[in-house]
Image (cartoon, coloured by chain):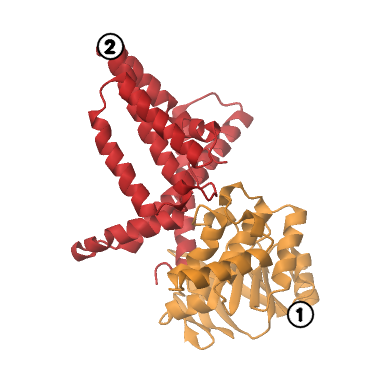
Chain colours: A red, B orange
Protein backbone atom coordinates (compact mmCIF):
# COMPACT_ATOMS: atom_id res chain seq x y z
CA UNK A 1 0.00 0.00 0.00
CA UNK A 2 1.19 3.47 -0.73
CA UNK A 3 0.11 6.54 1.22
CA UNK A 4 1.09 8.60 -1.81
CA UNK A 5 -1.85 7.65 -3.99
CA UNK A 6 -0.08 5.18 -6.26
CA UNK A 7 -1.79 2.34 -8.06
CA UNK A 8 -3.01 -0.63 -6.04
CA UNK A 9 -3.59 -3.62 -8.36
CA UNK A 10 -7.10 -5.03 -8.51
CA UNK A 11 -9.93 -6.25 -10.73
CA UNK A 12 -12.86 -4.40 -9.15
CA UNK A 13 -15.41 -2.48 -11.25
CA UNK A 14 -13.67 0.73 -10.18
CA UNK A 15 -10.33 -0.62 -11.42
CA UNK A 16 -11.89 -1.73 -14.72
CA UNK A 17 -13.63 1.59 -15.41
CA UNK A 18 -11.90 3.58 -18.20
CA UNK A 19 -9.35 6.11 -16.94
CA UNK A 20 -10.93 8.90 -18.98
CA UNK A 21 -14.34 8.23 -17.38
CA UNK A 22 -12.80 8.36 -13.92
CA UNK A 23 -11.02 11.63 -14.66
CA UNK A 24 -14.16 13.22 -16.11
CA UNK A 25 -16.16 11.95 -13.12
CA UNK A 26 -13.59 13.44 -10.74
CA UNK A 27 -13.80 16.84 -12.43
CA UNK A 28 -17.62 16.70 -12.54
CA UNK A 29 -17.92 15.77 -8.86
CA UNK A 30 -15.42 18.51 -8.01
CA UNK A 31 -17.66 21.05 -9.74
CA UNK A 32 -20.84 19.64 -8.17
CA UNK A 33 -19.28 19.79 -4.70
CA UNK A 34 -19.76 23.57 -4.84
CA UNK A 35 -23.48 22.94 -4.24
CA UNK A 36 -22.96 20.95 -1.05
CA UNK A 37 -23.90 23.25 1.82
CA UNK A 38 -25.41 21.05 4.54
CA UNK A 39 -23.37 18.74 6.81
CA UNK A 40 -25.75 15.82 6.15
CA UNK A 41 -25.21 16.23 2.38
CA UNK A 42 -21.46 16.14 2.86
CA UNK A 43 -21.75 13.16 5.21
CA UNK A 44 -23.82 11.32 2.57
CA UNK A 45 -21.21 12.01 -0.14
CA UNK A 46 -18.37 10.95 2.18
CA UNK A 47 -20.31 7.74 2.78
CA UNK A 48 -20.67 7.19 -0.98
CA UNK A 49 -16.98 7.80 -1.56
CA UNK A 50 -16.01 5.39 1.23
CA UNK A 51 -18.42 2.83 -0.27
CA UNK A 52 -16.54 3.27 -3.56
CA UNK A 53 -13.28 2.51 -1.73
CA UNK A 54 -14.90 -0.67 -0.39
CA UNK A 55 -16.17 -1.55 -3.89
CA UNK A 56 -12.61 -1.12 -5.17
CA UNK A 57 -11.39 -3.54 -2.49
CA UNK A 58 -9.41 -0.79 -0.73
CA UNK A 59 -9.18 -0.75 3.06
CA UNK A 60 -9.85 2.17 5.42
CA UNK A 61 -6.08 2.49 5.68
CA UNK A 62 -5.92 3.46 2.01
CA UNK A 63 -8.55 6.15 2.62
CA UNK A 64 -6.81 7.39 5.77
CA UNK A 65 -3.52 7.47 3.88
CA UNK A 66 -5.01 9.90 1.35
CA UNK A 67 -6.28 12.21 4.12
CA UNK A 68 -3.13 12.25 6.23
CA UNK A 69 -1.26 14.89 4.17
CA UNK A 70 -4.40 17.06 4.39
CA UNK A 71 -4.45 17.07 8.21
CA UNK A 72 -2.77 20.45 8.75
CA UNK A 73 -4.66 22.24 5.98
CA UNK A 74 -7.94 20.68 7.17
CA UNK A 75 -7.32 21.66 10.77
CA UNK A 76 -6.38 25.23 9.86
CA UNK A 77 -9.36 25.64 7.50
CA UNK A 78 -11.74 24.04 10.00
CA UNK A 79 -10.67 26.29 12.87
CA UNK A 80 -10.84 29.37 10.66
CA UNK A 81 -14.41 28.61 9.56
CA UNK A 82 -15.40 27.57 13.06
CA UNK A 83 -14.37 31.00 14.38
CA UNK A 84 -15.68 33.02 11.43
CA UNK A 85 -18.72 31.12 10.05
CA UNK A 86 -19.75 28.65 12.73
CA UNK A 87 -19.64 24.91 13.19
CA UNK A 88 -21.95 23.97 10.29
CA UNK A 89 -19.86 25.80 7.67
CA UNK A 90 -16.63 24.42 9.16
CA UNK A 91 -17.96 20.86 8.83
CA UNK A 92 -19.08 21.46 5.24
CA UNK A 93 -15.80 23.03 4.07
CA UNK A 94 -13.56 20.42 5.72
CA UNK A 95 -15.89 17.64 4.55
CA UNK A 96 -15.82 18.84 0.92
CA UNK A 97 -12.01 19.05 1.04
CA UNK A 98 -11.88 15.49 2.34
CA UNK A 99 -14.30 14.31 -0.38
CA UNK A 100 -12.20 15.84 -3.15
CA UNK A 101 -8.95 14.39 -1.80
CA UNK A 102 -10.52 10.96 -1.28
CA UNK A 103 -11.94 10.99 -4.82
CA UNK A 104 -8.62 12.01 -6.36
CA UNK A 105 -6.94 9.29 -4.29
CA UNK A 106 -9.50 6.73 -5.47
CA UNK A 107 -8.70 7.56 -9.10
CA UNK A 108 -4.92 7.22 -8.65
CA UNK A 109 -5.22 4.12 -6.45
CA UNK A 110 -7.33 2.28 -9.02
CA UNK A 111 -5.78 3.52 -12.28
CA UNK A 112 -2.35 2.73 -13.69
CA UNK A 113 -0.32 5.85 -14.34
CA UNK A 114 0.11 4.88 -17.99
CA UNK A 115 -3.68 4.69 -18.39
CA UNK A 116 -4.08 8.09 -16.70
CA UNK A 117 -1.37 9.54 -18.91
CA UNK A 118 -2.93 8.01 -22.05
CA UNK A 119 -6.31 9.54 -21.09
CA UNK A 120 -4.75 12.97 -20.52
CA UNK A 121 -2.77 12.71 -23.77
CA UNK A 122 -5.97 11.82 -25.67
CA UNK A 123 -7.82 14.68 -23.97
CA UNK A 124 -5.07 17.15 -24.85
CA UNK A 125 -4.88 16.16 -28.53
CA UNK A 126 -7.24 18.95 -29.69
CA UNK A 127 -4.85 21.41 -28.02
CA UNK A 128 -2.14 20.45 -30.52
CA UNK A 129 -3.68 23.13 -32.76
CA UNK A 130 -2.59 25.81 -30.28
CA UNK A 131 0.93 24.41 -29.88
CA UNK A 132 0.45 22.06 -26.92
CA UNK A 133 2.39 18.78 -27.16
CA UNK A 134 0.06 16.17 -25.60
CA UNK A 135 2.90 13.65 -25.10
CA UNK A 136 4.86 16.19 -23.07
CA UNK A 137 1.81 16.97 -20.93
CA UNK A 138 1.42 13.23 -20.25
CA UNK A 139 5.11 12.84 -19.43
CA UNK A 140 4.91 15.84 -17.10
CA UNK A 141 2.06 14.23 -15.16
CA UNK A 142 3.84 10.88 -14.91
CA UNK A 143 7.03 12.56 -13.71
CA UNK A 144 5.04 14.63 -11.19
CA UNK A 145 3.57 11.46 -9.68
CA UNK A 146 6.95 9.70 -9.76
CA UNK A 147 8.73 12.62 -8.07
CA UNK A 148 6.49 12.71 -4.96
CA UNK A 149 8.19 9.74 -3.24
CA UNK A 150 11.59 10.93 -4.49
CA UNK A 151 11.20 14.35 -2.85
CA UNK A 152 9.82 12.75 0.33
CA UNK A 153 12.94 10.53 0.40
CA UNK A 154 15.24 13.54 -0.14
CA UNK A 155 13.49 15.43 2.69
CA UNK A 156 14.00 12.46 5.03
CA UNK A 157 17.70 12.29 4.10
CA UNK A 158 18.16 16.02 4.80
CA UNK A 159 16.34 15.74 8.14
CA UNK A 160 18.46 12.72 9.14
CA UNK A 161 21.65 14.56 8.18
CA UNK A 162 20.55 17.53 10.32
CA UNK A 163 19.79 15.29 13.30
CA UNK A 164 23.13 13.48 12.92
CA UNK A 165 24.92 16.83 13.13
CA UNK A 166 22.82 17.93 16.11
CA UNK A 167 21.18 20.80 14.27
CA UNK A 168 17.88 22.07 15.64
CA UNK A 169 14.87 22.56 13.39
CA UNK A 170 15.63 25.47 11.09
CA UNK A 171 13.51 26.08 7.98
CA UNK A 172 16.48 27.52 6.07
CA UNK A 173 18.87 24.73 7.03
CA UNK A 174 16.21 22.28 5.86
CA UNK A 175 15.05 24.05 2.70
CA UNK A 176 18.42 24.93 1.14
CA UNK A 177 19.91 21.40 0.97
CA UNK A 178 16.52 19.99 0.00
CA UNK A 179 16.21 22.40 -2.93
CA UNK A 180 19.82 21.76 -3.98
CA UNK A 181 19.27 17.98 -3.90
CA UNK A 182 15.94 18.27 -5.72
CA UNK A 183 17.57 20.36 -8.46
CA UNK A 184 20.44 17.87 -8.72
CA UNK A 185 17.90 15.05 -9.01
CA UNK A 186 16.00 16.98 -11.69
CA UNK A 187 19.25 17.42 -13.61
CA UNK A 188 20.03 13.69 -13.41
CA UNK A 189 16.46 12.80 -14.36
CA UNK A 190 16.67 15.08 -17.39
CA UNK A 191 19.87 13.35 -18.47
CA UNK A 192 18.23 9.94 -18.00
CA UNK A 193 15.25 11.03 -20.09
CA UNK A 194 17.55 12.10 -22.90
CA UNK A 195 19.44 8.79 -22.60
CA UNK A 196 16.12 6.96 -22.95
CA UNK A 197 15.30 8.86 -26.11
CA UNK A 198 12.69 11.33 -24.82
CA UNK A 199 14.27 14.25 -26.61
CA UNK A 200 14.31 12.35 -29.88
CA UNK B 1 32.22 -0.77 -32.83
CA UNK B 2 32.91 2.34 -30.75
CA UNK B 3 35.47 4.75 -32.09
CA UNK B 4 36.78 8.00 -30.59
CA UNK B 5 39.16 10.07 -32.71
CA UNK B 6 40.98 13.10 -31.26
CA UNK B 7 38.25 13.53 -28.66
CA UNK B 8 38.49 16.31 -26.12
CA UNK B 9 35.82 17.76 -23.90
CA UNK B 10 35.70 20.79 -21.68
CA UNK B 11 33.13 22.17 -19.26
CA UNK B 12 33.74 25.91 -19.45
CA UNK B 13 37.45 26.40 -18.80
CA UNK B 14 37.90 22.96 -17.26
CA UNK B 15 39.24 20.35 -19.68
CA UNK B 16 37.91 16.92 -18.64
CA UNK B 17 39.08 14.85 -21.62
CA UNK B 18 42.15 15.42 -23.81
CA UNK B 19 42.93 13.86 -27.18
CA UNK B 20 41.37 10.46 -26.64
CA UNK B 21 41.92 8.03 -29.51
CA UNK B 22 40.43 4.60 -29.07
CA UNK B 23 38.68 1.93 -31.09
CA UNK B 24 36.60 -0.63 -29.19
CA UNK B 25 35.39 -3.85 -30.77
CA UNK B 26 35.55 -6.19 -27.77
CA UNK B 27 32.38 -7.37 -26.03
CA UNK B 28 33.44 -6.49 -22.47
CA UNK B 29 35.38 -3.33 -21.83
CA UNK B 30 36.02 -1.78 -18.43
CA UNK B 31 36.77 1.87 -17.75
CA UNK B 32 38.55 2.88 -14.54
CA UNK B 33 40.02 6.06 -13.12
CA UNK B 34 39.96 8.30 -10.09
CA UNK B 35 37.07 10.66 -9.46
CA UNK B 36 37.27 13.49 -11.97
CA UNK B 37 39.54 11.52 -14.33
CA UNK B 38 37.11 11.86 -17.24
CA UNK B 39 35.82 8.28 -17.34
CA UNK B 40 32.14 9.21 -16.85
CA UNK B 41 32.40 11.92 -19.49
CA UNK B 42 33.89 9.34 -21.86
CA UNK B 43 30.93 7.03 -21.16
CA UNK B 44 28.45 9.85 -21.82
CA UNK B 45 30.20 10.64 -25.11
CA UNK B 46 29.49 7.11 -26.34
CA UNK B 47 25.74 7.55 -25.87
CA UNK B 48 25.72 11.09 -27.25
CA UNK B 49 24.61 12.52 -23.91
CA UNK B 50 27.70 14.70 -24.11
CA UNK B 51 29.12 15.90 -27.41
CA UNK B 52 32.89 16.30 -27.78
CA UNK B 53 34.19 19.85 -27.99
CA UNK B 54 36.86 18.50 -30.35
CA UNK B 55 37.11 15.28 -32.34
CA UNK B 56 34.48 12.70 -33.20
CA UNK B 57 32.79 9.73 -31.54
CA UNK B 58 31.24 7.06 -33.76
CA UNK B 59 29.20 4.00 -32.85
CA UNK B 60 28.91 1.46 -35.66
CA UNK B 61 29.80 4.27 -38.04
CA UNK B 62 27.14 6.64 -36.67
CA UNK B 63 28.43 10.02 -35.50
CA UNK B 64 27.09 11.06 -32.09
CA UNK B 65 27.00 14.67 -33.28
CA UNK B 66 24.99 14.18 -36.45
CA UNK B 67 23.18 10.89 -35.75
CA UNK B 68 22.38 11.38 -32.08
CA UNK B 69 18.96 9.76 -32.23
CA UNK B 70 20.21 6.65 -34.00
CA UNK B 71 23.16 6.41 -31.61
CA UNK B 72 20.90 6.59 -28.54
CA UNK B 73 18.78 3.80 -30.03
CA UNK B 74 21.90 1.65 -30.36
CA UNK B 75 23.48 2.56 -27.05
CA UNK B 76 21.60 2.05 -23.78
CA UNK B 77 22.87 3.97 -20.77
CA UNK B 78 22.57 2.94 -17.13
CA UNK B 79 23.45 5.52 -14.47
CA UNK B 80 24.93 5.19 -10.98
CA UNK B 81 21.79 6.22 -9.12
CA UNK B 82 18.80 4.16 -10.25
CA UNK B 83 16.41 6.60 -8.56
CA UNK B 84 17.45 9.25 -11.03
CA UNK B 85 16.57 7.15 -14.08
CA UNK B 86 13.31 5.51 -13.05
CA UNK B 87 10.77 7.83 -14.60
CA UNK B 88 7.47 6.03 -14.06
CA UNK B 89 5.79 5.30 -10.71
CA UNK B 90 5.49 1.51 -10.98
CA UNK B 91 7.96 -1.18 -12.04
CA UNK B 92 6.11 -2.46 -15.14
CA UNK B 93 5.27 1.07 -16.29
CA UNK B 94 8.91 2.09 -16.14
CA UNK B 95 10.00 -0.88 -18.26
CA UNK B 96 7.19 -0.11 -20.72
CA UNK B 97 8.16 3.57 -20.94
CA UNK B 98 10.99 3.15 -23.48
CA UNK B 99 8.92 0.80 -25.63
CA UNK B 100 5.95 3.17 -25.75
CA UNK B 101 8.27 6.05 -26.67
CA UNK B 102 9.45 3.95 -29.62
CA UNK B 103 5.93 3.41 -30.84
CA UNK B 104 5.56 -0.26 -29.88
CA UNK B 105 1.97 -1.41 -29.62
CA UNK B 106 0.37 -1.87 -26.23
CA UNK B 107 0.15 -5.66 -26.77
CA UNK B 108 3.77 -6.02 -27.84
CA UNK B 109 4.91 -3.77 -24.98
CA UNK B 110 3.01 -5.87 -22.46
CA UNK B 111 4.63 -9.10 -23.68
CA UNK B 112 8.12 -7.66 -23.76
CA UNK B 113 7.71 -6.04 -20.34
CA UNK B 114 6.56 -9.35 -18.87
CA UNK B 115 9.55 -11.17 -20.38
CA UNK B 116 12.00 -8.49 -19.20
CA UNK B 117 10.63 -8.50 -15.64
CA UNK B 118 10.87 -12.29 -15.54
CA UNK B 119 14.44 -12.20 -16.87
CA UNK B 120 15.59 -9.78 -14.16
CA UNK B 121 13.69 -11.35 -11.25
CA UNK B 122 11.17 -8.54 -10.97
CA UNK B 123 8.02 -10.31 -12.17
CA UNK B 124 6.38 -10.36 -8.76
CA UNK B 125 6.99 -6.62 -8.38
CA UNK B 126 5.39 -5.60 -11.69
CA UNK B 127 2.70 -3.40 -10.15
CA UNK B 128 4.70 -2.29 -7.10
CA UNK B 129 5.76 1.34 -6.69
CA UNK B 130 9.35 1.57 -7.95
CA UNK B 131 10.47 3.64 -4.96
CA UNK B 132 9.70 0.74 -2.59
CA UNK B 133 12.20 -1.64 -4.26
CA UNK B 134 15.57 -2.38 -2.67
CA UNK B 135 18.68 -0.71 -4.08
CA UNK B 136 19.65 -3.82 -6.04
CA UNK B 137 16.14 -4.27 -7.41
CA UNK B 138 16.06 -0.62 -8.47
CA UNK B 139 19.31 -1.04 -10.37
CA UNK B 140 17.95 -4.23 -11.99
CA UNK B 141 14.83 -2.27 -12.94
CA UNK B 142 16.98 0.46 -14.45
CA UNK B 143 18.86 -2.19 -16.44
CA UNK B 144 15.64 -3.91 -17.51
CA UNK B 145 14.16 -0.59 -18.64
CA UNK B 146 17.19 0.09 -20.81
CA UNK B 147 17.68 -3.45 -22.14
CA UNK B 148 14.03 -4.07 -23.03
CA UNK B 149 14.55 -1.80 -26.03
CA UNK B 150 17.35 -4.15 -27.18
CA UNK B 151 20.28 -1.77 -27.63
CA UNK B 152 23.40 -3.18 -29.29
CA UNK B 153 25.67 -1.58 -26.68
CA UNK B 154 25.18 -1.05 -22.96
CA UNK B 155 27.12 1.70 -21.21
CA UNK B 156 26.91 1.55 -17.42
CA UNK B 157 28.37 4.27 -15.22
CA UNK B 158 29.27 2.78 -11.83
CA UNK B 159 26.10 0.66 -11.54
CA UNK B 160 27.31 -1.04 -8.34
CA UNK B 161 28.71 1.97 -6.48
CA UNK B 162 25.60 2.58 -4.35
CA UNK B 163 24.88 -1.11 -3.73
CA UNK B 164 25.84 -3.48 -0.93
CA UNK B 165 28.03 -6.51 -1.76
CA UNK B 166 25.11 -8.90 -2.35
CA UNK B 167 23.31 -6.50 -4.71
CA UNK B 168 26.55 -5.50 -6.41
CA UNK B 169 27.26 -9.18 -7.14
CA UNK B 170 23.70 -9.65 -8.40
CA UNK B 171 23.93 -6.71 -10.80
CA UNK B 172 27.43 -7.68 -11.98
CA UNK B 173 26.23 -11.25 -12.68
CA UNK B 174 23.40 -9.86 -14.79
CA UNK B 175 25.74 -7.53 -16.68
CA UNK B 176 28.24 -10.37 -17.24
CA UNK B 177 25.57 -12.52 -18.88
CA UNK B 178 24.27 -9.93 -21.32
CA UNK B 179 24.55 -10.53 -25.08
CA UNK B 180 25.24 -6.82 -25.64
CA UNK B 181 28.62 -5.17 -25.97
CA UNK B 182 29.19 -3.69 -22.51
CA UNK B 183 31.23 -0.65 -21.52
CA UNK B 184 31.42 -0.70 -17.72
CA UNK B 185 32.70 2.30 -15.77
CA UNK B 186 33.52 1.12 -12.27
CA UNK B 187 35.58 1.47 -9.10
CA UNK B 188 35.05 -2.24 -8.32
CA UNK B 189 38.16 -3.60 -9.98
CA UNK B 190 37.34 -7.26 -9.28
CA UNK B 191 34.35 -6.97 -11.67
CA UNK B 192 36.81 -6.58 -14.53
CA UNK B 193 38.67 -9.89 -14.13
CA UNK B 194 36.70 -11.60 -16.90
CA UNK B 195 36.65 -8.58 -19.20
CA UNK B 196 38.38 -8.41 -22.58
CA UNK B 197 40.01 -5.02 -22.15
CA UNK B 198 40.31 -2.19 -19.61
CA UNK B 199 40.87 1.53 -20.24
CA UNK B 200 42.47 3.65 -17.52
CA UNK B 201 41.81 7.39 -17.44
CA UNK B 202 43.82 9.92 -15.48
CA UNK B 203 43.37 13.69 -15.52
CA UNK B 204 41.37 13.49 -18.73
CA UNK B 205 43.85 11.32 -20.63
CA UNK B 206 43.63 7.69 -21.64
CA UNK B 207 46.84 6.55 -19.93
CA UNK B 208 46.54 2.77 -20.24
CA UNK B 209 44.66 0.46 -22.60
CA UNK B 210 45.39 -3.19 -21.92
CA UNK B 211 44.18 -6.57 -20.73
CA UNK B 212 42.44 -6.45 -17.31
CA UNK B 213 45.33 -7.77 -15.18
CA UNK B 214 47.87 -5.36 -16.70
CA UNK B 215 45.53 -2.34 -16.76
CA UNK B 216 44.30 -2.86 -13.19
CA UNK B 217 47.91 -3.31 -12.04
CA UNK B 218 48.84 -0.06 -13.78
CA UNK B 219 45.88 1.71 -12.16
CA UNK B 220 46.79 0.44 -8.68
CA UNK B 221 50.34 1.80 -9.09
CA UNK B 222 48.96 5.10 -10.37
CA UNK B 223 46.81 5.49 -7.29
CA UNK B 224 49.64 4.92 -4.78
The residue sitting at 34% across, 48% down in the picture is: A23
Image coords of residue A182 (percent x, y): 47, 46
Give the labeled residue for mark 2.
A86
Q: From where the camera sits, is residue B33 visible? A: no
Q: Is residue A169 above or below residue B119?
A: above
Element on which disc 2 rests: loop
Image coords of residue B204 (percent x, y): 58, 70
The residue sitting at 50% across, 47% down in the picture is: A12
Image coords of residue A183 (percent x, y): 44, 48
Out of B69 and B58, give the one closest to the viewer.
Answer: B69
Q: Residues within 10 Å of mark 2 (few under 14, many from 20)?
A: few
Query: CA–CA distance between discs 2 and 1?
Result: 80 Å
Q: Is residue A62 above or below residue A167?
A: below
Q: Is residue A162 above or below residue B224?
A: above
Q: Find the residue positioned furthest to the bottom.
A: B61
The residue sitting at 33% across, 28% down in the picture is: A96
Quadrant where the N terminus of chain B is found in the figure:
bottom right
Residue A164 is tagged as none
Q: Chain of mark 2?
A: A
Out of A152 and B196, give the one closest to the viewer.
Answer: A152
Image coords of residue A63 (percent x, y): 49, 33
Out of B21 and A134, give the one closest to the viewer.
Answer: A134
Quadrant where the C terminus of chain B is found in the figure:
bottom right
Give the labeled residue for mark 1.
B211
Out of A15 and B66, give the one closest to the viewer.
Answer: A15
Amino acid sequence: MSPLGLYVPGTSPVHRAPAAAKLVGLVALGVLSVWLDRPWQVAAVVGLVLASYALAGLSWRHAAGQLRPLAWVGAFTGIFHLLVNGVERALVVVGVLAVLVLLAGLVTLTTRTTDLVDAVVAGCRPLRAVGVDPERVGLMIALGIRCVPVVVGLAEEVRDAQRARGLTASPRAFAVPLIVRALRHADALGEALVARGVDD
Amino acid sequence: MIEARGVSHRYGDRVVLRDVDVRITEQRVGVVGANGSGKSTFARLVNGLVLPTAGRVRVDGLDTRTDGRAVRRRVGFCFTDPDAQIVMPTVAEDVAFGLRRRGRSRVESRTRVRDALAAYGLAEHADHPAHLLSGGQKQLLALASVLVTEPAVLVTDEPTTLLDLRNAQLVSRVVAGLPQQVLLVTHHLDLLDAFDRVLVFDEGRLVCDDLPAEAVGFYRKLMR
